[in-house]
Image (cartoon, rainbow, N blue to C red):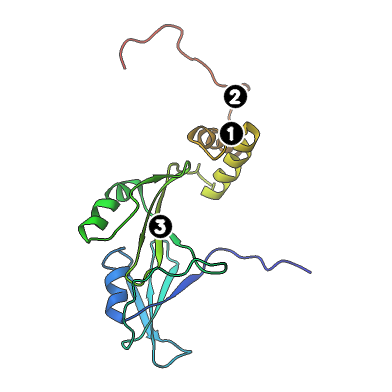
Amino acid sequence: MKKIQTQGVHHITIVGATRQMAIDFWEGVLGMPFIFEQPNLDNANESHLYFDPGDGRLITIFTNENRTADPTPNPEGIGNLHHIAFSVSRSTFIETARRLNERGIKNTGEIDRGFMYSIYFRDPLGQRYELASYKFEPPAGCTHAQVLFEAHKIRVAEGAYNIQDSHLADALELLTRRNQGSLSDDLSAKHAYPRPVDGP
């Protein structure tokens, strides 16, 4: 028996209400370009809208002009979707709460998750979404997942409750040292200041 190896999220499909409501939320609020549309090939009464969340992958929405929006929060029982998180830059994240508030969209405000910042809100159909901004950029040739993997090992060895900034910094140093050669024989940290330096 062998694994079926995945290589990333291909797309996520949401059951939406009307076509315009989908466009207004996904493109008009979250800035995802509306890139193409065709019939839902499994249901002739529905349209299938495709949006680019920013990485060239796809968020797709089934729409039907006979459906009305129900903002009741989606159920959170076993097997149900809790939330979907989208990545945003730190500069966008700083503006997120204000821009949601301008539209009257209730949100959690900024939450520090140790390795990223998060903000949560619901769409017009009651589904919860998260906008997340990493606290770090991975070294060239590495992924965010690789940094988190190393930071996790450092956290566990330290006995810390969750990943902290220091774990991320140490993971970044470790991955850089591992992936980039150096002509130096001694790669240990140095003081490098033989005399005090005046001023910042």
Q: Which mark is residue 187?
A: 2
Image x and y of residue 115, in percent: 48, 43
Give the SS element for disc 1. helix
Mark 1 Cα-neighbour bin, 10 Å: few <14, some 14–19, many ≥20: few
- Amino acid at the residue labelled 2: Leu
The single residue placed furthest to the top in the displayed view is 195
Q: Residue at x 38, y 68 (%)?
A: 52
Q: 82 or 3, which lies in front? A: 82
Give the SS element for disc 2. loop
Mark 3 Cα-neighbour bin, 10 Å: few <14, some 14–19, many ≥20: some
Of circles 3 and 1, the one toward us is 3
For disc 1, the marked residue is 177
Image x and y of residue 41, in percent: 46, 89
The single residue placed furthest to the left in the displayed view is 102
| Among the 4 quarters of the image, the one containing residue 66 | bottom left
Dot 2 and dot 1 residues touching (CB under 8 Å):
yes
Q: 200 or 132, which lies in front? A: 132
Image x and y of residue 29, in percent: 28, 64
- Give the answer, above or below, for where 118 lies relative to 9: above
Marks 2 and 1, the one that precedes in the sequence: 1
**Quadrant where the N terminus lies?**
bottom right
Marks 2 and 3, the one that precedes in the sequence: 3
- Give the answer, above or below, for where 173 lies relative to 101: above
Number of disc labels: 3
For disc 3, the marked residue is 130
